[in-house]
Image (cartoon, grey):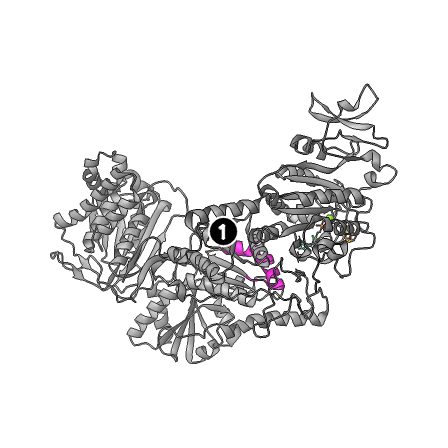
Amino acid sequence: MAAQPEPAGSGERSSNTPKTIIGAVVRFAGDSGDGMQVTGDQFTTTAAVLGNDLATFPDFPAEIRAPAGTLYGVSGFQINFASKDVFTPGDRPDVLVAMNPAALKTNLPDLVPGGLLVVNADAFSPQNLKKAGYEKSPLEGSELEGYQVLSVDITKHTVNAVKPTGLSVKEANRCKNFWTLGLMYWIYNRPLELTLEWLQKKYAKRPDVVEANSLALKAGHAFGETVELGYQRYEVPAAPVTKGKYRNIAGNTATSWGLVAAAQLSGLEVVLGSYPITPASTILHELSKHKHLGVTTIQAEDEIAAACIAIGASYAGGIGVCTTSGPGMALKMEAIGLAISVELPLVIVNIQRAGPSTGMPTKTEQADLLQAVYGRNSEAPLCVIAASTPGDCFHMAIEAVRLATKFMTPVVLLTDGYLANGAEPWLIPKVEDLPKIDVNFRKEAEGFHPFLRDPETLARNWAIPGTPGLRHRIGGIEKDHDSGHISYDPQNHERMSQVRATKIANIAKFVPEQKIGLGDDHGKLLVLGWGSTYGAIREAVRNCRDRGLSVSHAHLNYLFPFPRNLGDVLSRFDRVLIPEMNMGQLVKLIRSEYLIPAESYPKIQGQPFRIEELEDRIRKTLEN
Amino acid sequence: MSQVIDQKKLTRKDFSTDQDVRWCPGCGDYSILANVQRVMPEVGVMPDNMVWVSGIGCAARFPYYMDTYGFHTIHGRAPAFVTGIKATNPELNVWLASGDGDSLSIGGNHLLHCLRRNLDVRILLFNNRIYGLTKGQYSPTSEVGKVTASTPVGSADQPVDPCSFALGCNGTFVARSIDVEAKHLAGVLKRASEHRGTAFVEIYQNCNVFNDGAFKSFTDKDNKLDNQLRVENGQPLLYGKDNRRGLRLDPKTLALETVTIGENGVTEADLLVHDESNGVIASLLVRMPRPTFPVAIGVLFRTERTTYDESLRQQKQAVVDRAGANDLEALLNSGNTWEV
Ligand SMILES: Cc1ncc(C[n+]2csc(CCOP(=O)(O)OP(=O)(O)O)c2C)c(N)n1
Ligand code: SF4
Ligand SMILES: [Mg+2]
């Protein structure tokens, strides 16, 4: 997230010349019917095109159609945009737009002291106040004293603005998010054109809707301009980012496209078996649109079937993939054990959510790491990797397929709800730059048995049904190392268990060494993270280093096995601190693997780490 | 491991592996295996293009003995594996061997969805009304009051009839046969092999160790003809030693009744004529209570419906026709983009 040089509403009230700042965090919050996601998307697109670096995060209510005006029906969208690198959607908003009392109540605690609060005063009716649990209107008391309050009758202004279109009051009312967006564009000195163009395209079939929303947008902007608001305006210049063509991408879209890319790069069909579950379902939805790109999707009858379908697909020569969340991965475990035993490629993507059991499905967590590494009966090793940013999901999905096919093994790719729905600008890769995935099916019958291995990778040969002369039987019963036939021989079982373990351990030879992402390769403290905590840790470490602290950041993409040099990397620091959105899972793996007293910083609130929390913890750690 | 085979001269040996068969001596599974191996050369599929898939159980050991491709998976889930196999390579000729516990207990859900989707697979359900492999617990097809290791005072649950279940799931081919009726079984297997879609075949199979004689009342030489109704498409529903017993539909109750030709003025013209495509007749036949009625065997129901694998293929083709194939570059660059 961007530094907060100055809250948007602070300081001088006179000048209308925008003041240049490094960046800002804006949160739009309203009732689920208030169109906050669209508003946020539009603000994001404009910021992106102006060249800001940015990160966004939507916060949907858990209920599908929550009753209007209630606390649990509040929908939010936060954007952090800046003229420097941005790694997270931001800890706390500098500007909060609250379209009703419920939105104010649930979001106000996050607003930075002195921040700008834009409220739709029209929505503060006795009825809405009551639904939000206010006894009297907060607009009247002293509660908002520490903030810059811009209380506007947004509904009235909007209805007036769209009058010429002749839309009903109800429909006119729906344009108030664009009025608000117009006002925000004024505050941040942004052009209206991109949103106007978008409206034209989006509602091509409803010219009256285009007209009304355009009028509302312009009116909101003009309100700032003509009413001579005494509020400071801001300018956030472009960030120095790598040249190229960009798009905004959310984690689940990136994961889906990575899988599509893997189909193209390997020349094999990706066969997805999936059962709907939050927050993974959007991958099933996205992949189902791309049947022309080497993808087959099957909505299975349950997660067990989904895993079995994927394994069946790999058996037949496709790339079996299943996408799910924690409870679904739990159901798949017996099938995953079979894939380990018969040594077939399989990719399991787990978009982690807060648990146990149903837990908090729309909230994020990283507590399935141990489930992924150890959650099966007997000795059943597989490969576990994780993505660290929304855009990284694309590359790690390709990597999962590459490893699964190269080593004939299940690979678990861990992402989480925060990555799934969070978005960032993404430098669109060129297809010809993406690494090909080499797959060789066994063809020659001479000397064949199903568990013949590549001497280097220990992967068994992949012989698919329909190949002349390679008929064979495989299954979950232990097989003889040298013939592939069923075997209950005690020595053979130990040997096979070792081979399976060694094969997975050897993957470390084929993946990149661990790098220090930020800071020196030695020092007092290394902050070691994995997954979606990347942005927050990086930002916190950067801030601490700016203040002269001896701290570095390393972030793991490969969790099982660990990168081959990780022990070395860790040994060059006096202390290792591991922040995780769980009760301390990576820290257990690190301690047991490297016998070092790594320190745990767990957070299990269904919420990502705030940068300030991390900075605090780093500082305290270095103090004692 | 395998030899190259000349398609024209396929024999049962081409479908037999050299593995030691590990069923108990006298088990009904042997005769099913022998029958299947005898019928396979007539199916017209090279062993290289055939896959046998199974779950877990005695029945599920079947793939090890077939010299085709074989996948012995996990308990109850074989239909889901087959779904993935057929979705990936619809050209493969796939068979599934399963037990009553595998198919109707742990795997009931998957069987249901396989049948309603009409996946192109032949499912052989070896019904011995017991869990064989785990040493004799009652199964979902065991009769009420079944005394087993896990039910010392008798089981409390009503059994499910596999063919009834298959019809209820909108199965497109539902048939029944018996392990010891070699010729009949071969005929049913041949018919199943010709069906496109899910061909569901229940085979009564004697587990001589844990449920010996479960089907004695209609398999014993002396009385079997009086207790087996061998249905033939287009033929009146006749049975009995002298083929004079038959089934008649009571139009008032819409129920079947057993009658004897020559008694009470009953002639062959009064009997119900079997029509494979008639789901109502099929559901009456599979639900006939014993011992009042005989056990119906043969092809009880058959209809045609697009298979799941074919639907997947058609959908894909339609999307390719509309969108063109394989443009990853276009996907990555779709929607809102900007240059820096
Ligand atoms: C997940 C799981 N649960 C339980 C078992 C144990 N198990 C193996 S076979 C079986 C029942 C087999 O009965 P059936 O399907 O009727 O086959 P049969 O042995 O009678 O041919 C059971 C309970 C298992 N293998 N896997
Ligand atoms: S236990 Fe029963 S079903 Fe299993 S092999 Fe023995 S006789 Fe056959
Ligand atoms: Mg059984």
User: What is the span of residues highlighted in magenta in the rendered image?
Assistant: A325-345
* x and y percentages locating residue A462 in the rendered image: 60, 64
Mark 1 secondary-structure assignment: loop
Question: Where in the figure is residue B33, as x and y percent of width and height?
Answer: 76, 52
Residue A477 locus on image (x, y percent)? 68, 62
Q: Is residue A340 magenta?
A: yes
Q: Which image quadrant is residue B270 in?
A: top right
In magenta stretch: residue A61? no
Which residue does the numbered mark 1 point to in the structure image?
A: A358
In the displayed structure, B294 sits above or below A586; it is above
Quick one: B337 or A488, which is closer to the camera?
Answer: B337
Where does the image place residue A458, in percent across and percent down from the top left? 59, 71
- How many numbered marks have been drawn onto this rendered protein structure? 1
Position of B26 compared to A601: left or right? right
Q: Residue at x 40, y 62 (%)?
A: A431
Give whichever of A161, A193 is nearer the camera.
Answer: A193
The extreme top residue here reads: B265
Q: Quadrant of the C terminus of chain B?
A: bottom left
- In the rendered view, would you say A337 is above or below A510? above
Please tell me which residue is depicted at 74% across the width and 59% down the height of the picture: B17
| Picture quarter with the N terminus of chain B | bottom right
The amino acid type, in three-letter code, at marker 1 is: Thr
